[in-house]
């Protein structure tokens, strides 16, 4: 047990859209972890809240004709209600737009200013002359300065994944009106992140949690840390101290929400929030793998600089796939928690079980309706549910109830071994291993009752049959306590059918080996229902229809061009003189191509399909009048044409001199 109260948080859901399975990859494991700690006797406070600020919410609100506050309230309520339906029980679910978070954020900013960790600087930032405003983050799109991919203002989301500071993006365009943006100077405020390199190196080696969080962050720390622009030109957000024209960056006030929500909980319960955040509090963050950088680098540095305690553990989940495809709302590969699941009457426990039992928390999780149904039918119905029901049914039907007997030592030892296995798995954040250990105990119970065959034994030796059932009832009680963190509704049903008093969540796992009080048992009801093929087919059809609709939306009407427009493109035959890989890129090659009048340097994304040596001497088709661009720090003056997913190079079918034009 920990020395003091523990605080567990989950990454904040963003209030510009509904809940989907990708969200639950964080919240269900966090809830399971908290429930188990409480079963173990720990004092735990579980907080979360909605993330209400930032440009995506402003953009979405403008598109829907509502205010950012109205949109945030709508989705805040949506997430709060959805989490309750999924059995996720936060002690406090707040809003970052709440008064407490505004106050706490400004206080921390002032503390950082007072400690000399924030300074002002004039920078060039994208400005739209049509909209007459600066373009922060999602308002602007352009080219990543690091890899050349299309990127949004704050992140290269389609390329290298690097965080982008205001003004870094190249060829900026306003995403609202499409106007080419110009650079204008503006004063902003920066956090001296670079001064925390040594601290972060030590912190990341000592912090508990998952390796994917620590190792990813250490890679950034060992590379280079740049000072971080922490203000934005927006009306929606937390005002930066002393400025009416700037708000703090959403990735500043969002994690500060963890502190604010703790304050709100503490106020309601007569506690002091400082026992968690201003000393040696035990704080565990559950996050999605895509926000590791913010929680492992920005956040602990902010806390340290402002004089607060730092997290004790950071637990990052793996990514989600739908039907072996990358999760994508725009492409239709998404399962909405309410529309596609809860609103259809499917049990929350089934989905909780799948998310926790499918794979290790840090690995990629693939969701398909068929795999989901197979798990429900084979593991929940045939194994877990079968053992519990046949035990309770036999005990009731034969008038045995819970007999006034103790369980055999072998049974108690097996339960103790399972508790130890679950303990070890939970401490290692291996939630699948914990669930597997419980399911192994259920399988053991199935094998035990099948081998002992009390339905036969009762005809010749009733006392022996009664002892078998008593042993099975001990296993059923243990299963209720151990499965509660994973499937709380199921555990409550078992607890009730056993005739136990109180709520199962209020009991310790150690009670799994305690004697059961003798009593009669009421007729049991099955815990689970099989998923039939027709039901699965209907669910799959809904998903495929969504994918088909997304594909149709993604195919704009064919835009025709005139022969004059085509004539503006200059195509010529070229010969590859040399080729080499570009450092730190797995896709790009730097080519020197002879186009007759000169030799051009061209960057081409064909490294996965061709060895540089085999390209030398190859004739290729080149667009020669493209504007030069810099990709991964290498200037490219032209484009080589290729066809298909495997980049089949377009070449003339006979020998042609370099520079020969294509007509």
Image (tube, rainbow, N blue to C red):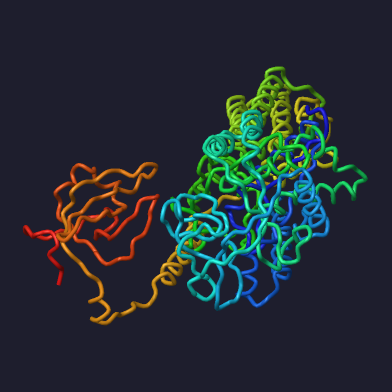
Is the N terminus in the top left, top right, bottom left or bottom right quadrant?
Answer: top right
Question: Would residue 633 be found to the left or right of residue 47 on screen?
Answer: left
Where residue 460 appears, as percent x and y from the top left, is 66, 23
Vertical side of 537 occupied by 508: above or below:
above
Where residue 254 appears, as percent x and y from the top left, is 70, 53
Where residue 325 appears, as percent x and y from the top left, is 44, 53
Q: Nearer the viewer, residue 28 or 254?
A: 254
Q: Residue at x 73, y 68 (%)?
A: 69
Quadrant housing residue 392: top right
Q: Residue at x 27, y 82 (%)?
A: 562
Question: Would residue 226 be found to the left or right of residue 46 on screen?
Answer: left
Q: Does the image show residue 284?
A: yes
Q: Residue at x 71, y 68 (%)?
A: 235
Q: Does the image show residue 385?
A: no
Where residue 340 appears, as percent x and y from the top left, is 58, 61
Give the mark count: 0
Q: Residue at x 69, y 40 (%)?
A: 300
Question: Would residue 213 be found to the left or right of residue 491 on screen?
Answer: left
């Amino acid at each position: 047990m920990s020395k003091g109260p523990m605080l567990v948080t989950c990454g904040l859901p963003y209030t510009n859209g509904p809940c989907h399975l990708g969200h639950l990859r964080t919240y269900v494991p966090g809830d399971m972890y908290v429930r188990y700690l409480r079963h173990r006797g720990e004092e735990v406070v579980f907080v979360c809240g909605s993330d209400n600020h930032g440009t995506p919410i402003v953009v979405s609100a403008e598109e829907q004709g509502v205010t950012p506050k109205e949109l945030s309230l709508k989705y805040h309520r949506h997430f709060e209600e959805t989490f309750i339906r999924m059995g996720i029980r936060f002690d406090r679910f707040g809003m970052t737009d709440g008064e407490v978070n505004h106050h706490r954020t400004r206080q921390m900013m002032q503390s950082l200013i007072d400690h000399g960790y924030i300074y002002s600087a004039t920078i060039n930032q994208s400005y739209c002359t049509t909209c007459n405003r600066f373009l922060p983050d999602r308002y602007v799109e352009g080219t990543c300065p690091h890899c050349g991919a299309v990127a949004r203002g704050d992140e290269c989301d389609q390329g290298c994944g690097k965080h982008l500071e205001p003004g870094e993006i190249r060829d900026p365009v306003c995403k609202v009106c499409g106007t080419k943006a110009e650079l204008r100077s503006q004063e902003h405020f920066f956090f001296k992140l670079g001064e925390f390199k040594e601290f972060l190196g030590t912190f990341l080696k000592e912090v508990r949690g998952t390796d994917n969080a620590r190792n990813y962050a250490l890679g950034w720390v060992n590379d280079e840390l740049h000072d971080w622009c922490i203000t934005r030109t927006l009306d929606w957000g937390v005002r930066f101290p002393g400025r009416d024209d700037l708000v703090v960056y959403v990735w500043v006030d969002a994690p500060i929400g963890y502190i604010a929500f703790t304050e709100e909980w503490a106020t309601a319960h007569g506690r002091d929030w400082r026992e968690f955040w201003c000393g040696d509090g035990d704080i565990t963050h559950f996050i999605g793998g895509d926000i590791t950088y913010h929680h492992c680098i920005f956040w602990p540095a902010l806390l340290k600089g402002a004089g607060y305690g730092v997290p004790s553990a950071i637990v990052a989940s793996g990514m989600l796939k739908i039907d072996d495809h990358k999760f994508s709302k725009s492409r239709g590969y998404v399962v909405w928690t309410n529309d596609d699941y809860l609103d259809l009457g499917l049990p929350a426990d089934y989905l909780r079980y799948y998310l926790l039992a499918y794979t290790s928390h840090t690995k990629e999780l693939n969701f398909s309706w068929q795999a989901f149904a197979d798990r429900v039918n084979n593991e929940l119905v045939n194994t877990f549910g079968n053992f519990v029901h046949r035990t309770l049914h036999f005990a009731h039907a034969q008038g045995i109830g819970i007999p006034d007997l103790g369980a055999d030592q072998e049974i108690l030892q097996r339960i103790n071994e399972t508790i130890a296995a679950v303990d070890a798995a939970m401490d290692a954040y291996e939630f699948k291993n914990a669930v597997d250990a419980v399911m192994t105990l259920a399988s053991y119970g199935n094998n035990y009752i099948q081998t002992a065959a009390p339905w036969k034994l009762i005809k010749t030796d009733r006392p022996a049959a009664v002892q078998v059932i008593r042993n099975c009832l001990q296993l059923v009680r243990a299963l209720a306590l151990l499965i509660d963190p994973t499937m709380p509704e199921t555990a409550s049903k078992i607890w009730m059918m056993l005739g136990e008093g109180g709520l199962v969540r209020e009991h310790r796992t150690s009670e799994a080996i305690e004697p059961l009080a003798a009593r009669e048992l009421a007729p049991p009801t099955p815990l689970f229902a099989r998923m039939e093929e027709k039901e699965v087919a209907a669910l799959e059809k809904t998903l495929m229809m969504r994918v088909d609709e997304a594909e149709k939306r993604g195919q704009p009407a064919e835009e025709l061009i005139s022969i004059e427009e085509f004539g503006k493109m200059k195509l010529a035959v070229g010969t590859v003189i040399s080729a080499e890989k570009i450092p730190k890129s797995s896709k790009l090659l730097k080519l020197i191509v002879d186009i007759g009048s000169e030799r051009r340097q061209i960057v081409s994304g064909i490294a996965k399909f061709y060895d540089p040596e085999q390209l030398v001497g190859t004739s290729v088709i080149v667009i020669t009048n493209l504007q030069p661009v810099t990709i991964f720090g290498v200037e490219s003056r032209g484009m080589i044409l290729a066809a298909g997913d495997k980049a089949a190079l377009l070449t003339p079918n006979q020998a042609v001199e370099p520079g020969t034009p294509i007509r």
